[in-house]
Image: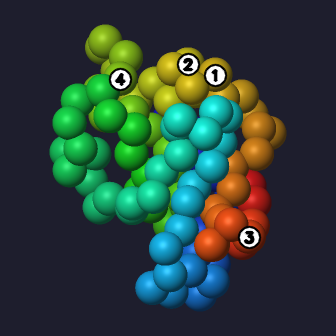
Amino acid sequence: MRITNIHRDQFVTLVKDQPFRITFGRSQYDITVLNQTYDEVPQGERVALFGAGGMLEIAVNKGVEGSGGGASRLFGLHVQDPVRVELRGQRALAS
């Protein structure tokens, strides 16, 4: 799991009902849907959701055996790597 510094309030204020894209790493990993829970996507699928603290989280549903995530390992993400939320091709928020 990769927890960003993008808070739900910031996201809602800027994105509203507009189409968005969460980008990180390679473009094949981009996410265009927010989920409420991990179980809303199949095992092994990437997921973006807001955690209990209200921060945007990027994860893989049961992506690592014996663990409930694995985004850092599977996507090659590291601390301080940028995660961006873009609106219609323009950057809106960056982590």
Q: Residue at x 30, y 27 (%)?
A: 44
Residue 36 quadrant: bottom left
Q: CA distance from mark 1 to mark 2?
A: 5 Å
What's the amino acid at mark 3? Answer: Gln
Q: Secondary structure at mark 4?
A: loop
Q: Give the mark nearer the N terminus: 1 vs 4.
A: 4
* Between discs 1 and 3, the one toward the N terminus: 1
Locate residue 40 relative to residue 19 in the image: left or right: left
Q: Are marks 4 and 2 in contact (CB under 8 Å)?
A: yes
Secondary structure under tag 1 reads loop
Residue picked out by circle 1: 76
Q: Nearer the viewer, residue 88 or 68?
A: 88
Q: Are marks 3 and 2 in contact (CB under 8 Å)?
A: no
Q: Earlier in the sequence, mark 4 or mark 2?
A: 4
Residue underneath mark 3? 90
Q: Is residue 9 visible?
A: no
Q: Position of residue 48 (x, y in %)?
A: 44, 52
Q: CA distance from mark 4 to mark 2?
A: 9 Å
1 or 3: mark nearer the eye: 3
Residue where numbered disc 2 is placed = 73
Binning the other alpha carbons within 10 Å of mark 2 as few (below 14), some (14 to 19) or many (20 upward) gives some
Q: Where does the image place residue 67, in percent across and percent down from the top left?
A: 35, 21
Q: Is 83 positioned to the left or the right of 34 in the image? A: right
What residue type is disc 4 on? Gly
Q: Can you say whether 84 is above or below 80 in the image?
A: below
Q: Quadrant of residue 87?
A: bottom right
Q: Which residue is mark 4?
A: 63
Tell me what residue is drawn at x 39 percent, y 45 percent.
47
Q: Residue furthest right?
A: 80
- The x and y percentages for residue 57 are 51, 50
In which quadrant of the rendered image does the C terminus lie? Answer: bottom right
